[in-house]
Amino acid sequence: MQKVSEVMTPRVQVIDPESTIKEAAQQMRGGDFGMLPVAENDRMIGSISDRDIVIRAVAEGKEGNTRVRDVMSEGIVWVYEDDSVDEAAQRMSENQVRRLPVVNRDKRLVGIVTLGDFAVESSDIRPAAEALTEISRPS
């Protein structure tokens, strides 16, 4: 059974909750990714996605200097690096997310895994297809 560590991206950037959404958007653009874990005092406290910026900031008329803390998704769904791809896909389905931070058993951030990683890196595309079906369902 394939493990998350085999398909995840090990380079992960995080952002401080006091950073601006403009800084978050620039970091996402520069790294070509759509979600950043939000870290405070060496702990993940949430995440901010390109969708959070659009729905909770731009659509509400907020400026680029709005703090990440004000539009981020609180709490965070994650997986362990030694979890199976199937377990990660299930977690994505249950929470209707396409990206998950990956932590080691000491709960230290070690990577990020996306639905696309399952489809591209995995020899079995089934978990990605099943997760996408669930994620795409209206909540």
Image (spheres, rainbow, N blue to C red):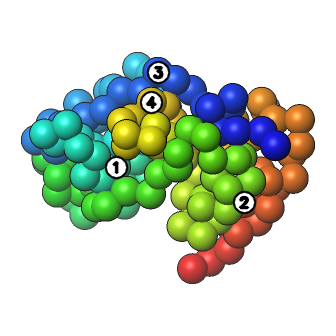
Disc 2 residue type (three-letter): Ala
Q: How crowded is the residue under tag 2: few (<14 C-alpha within 10 Å), some, or many (20+)?
A: many
**Neighbourhood count class around disc 1 (C-alpha, 10 Å): few under 14, some 14–19, many 20 upward:** many
In the picture of the structure, the residue carrying the numbered disc 2 is: 131
Mark 4 vs mark 1: give the one in front: 4
Of the numbered discs 1 and 3, the one sitting upstream in the chain is 3
Picture disc at residue 74: none
On residue 11, which mark appears? 3
Foreground: 95 or 6?
6
Q: Position of residue 40 (x, y in %)?
A: 16, 42
User: Camera-side residue: 21 or 17?
Assistant: 17
Q: Amino acid at mark 4?
A: Val
> Which residue, given by chain and number where applicable, does mark 1 sit on?
47
Element assignment for label 2: helix
Query: Which residue lies at the image location 28% right of the left edge and 46% below the top edge?
Result: 44
Q: Along the horizontal axis of the image, is 96 left or right of 75?
A: right
Q: CA distance from mark 2 to mark 4?
A: 22 Å
Q: Nearer the viewer, mark 1 or mark 3?
A: 3
- Secondary structure under tag 4 reads strand
Indicate which disc, 2 or 4, sits on the residue closer to the N terminus. Answer: 4
Helix, strand, or loop for circle 3? loop
